[in-house]
Image (cartoon, rainbow, N blue to C red):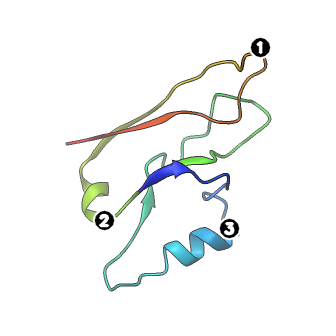
Amino acid sequence: MLGDFNRRLARADDVLWAELDDGQPANADLSLAEGAATPKCDPRYKEFIDHIVLDARATRGLVGFEEQVYAAADGRPSDHCPVVALLR
């Protein structure tokens, strides 16, 4: 599942992530494709708000993660970082 969640799911206290990654159904262990990476798109933010959520099987196939950095039309950095998960 991927998209603009407008939430910092990597934060330990994020209630949406707790609900998504609740182990239901059985063996539904989720992870974020960014792992421990932090965004480079805007230095004000320490966590992504755009995510790729992987199940256990997809996580085993994850071979890389990338983000695109760009400036908004007004030249300021964007808080949205287009992200890519590389799977085998």
Residue 52 appears in the figure: no
Q: What SS does tag 2 mark?
A: helix
Residue 41: percent from left, percent from top: 65, 28
Q: What SS does tag 3 mark?
A: loop
Q: Nearer the viewer, residue 64 or 4?
A: 4
Q: Nearer the viewer, residue 51 or 37?
A: 51
Please tell me whether mark 1 or mark 2 is closer to you in this view: 1
What is the distance, in whole Å, between disc 1 and disc 2 at their CAs? 39 Å
Q: Classify 10 Å Cα crowding around label 3: few (below 14), some (14-19), many (20 and above).
A: few
Residue 21 appears in the figure: yes
Sequence order check, earlier mark of 2 and 3: 3
What is the distance, in whole Å, between disc 2 and disc 3 at their CAs? 20 Å
Residue named by callout 1: 75
Residue at 44% x, 61% y is: 31
Q: Amino acid at mark 2?
A: Ala
Q: Are marks 1 and 3 in contact (CB under 8 Å)?
A: no
Residue named by callout 2: 56
Residue named by callout 3: 14
Q: Are marks 2 and 3 in contact (CB under 8 Å)?
A: no
Residue 66: percent from left, percent from top: 44, 31
Residue at 68% x, 67% y is: 14
Q: Classify 10 Å Cα crowding around label 1: few (below 14), some (14-19), many (20 and above).
A: few
- Establish if 70 lies above or below 67: above
Q: Quadrant of the C terminus?
A: top left
Q: Classify 10 Å Cα crowding around label 2: few (below 14), some (14-19), many (20 and above).
A: few
Name the side, left or right, on which 24 lies relative to 17: left
Q: Amino acid at mark 3?
A: Asp
Q: Quadrant of the N terminus?
A: bottom left
Q: What SS does tag 1 mark?
A: loop
Name the side, left or right, on which 11 lies relative to 67: right
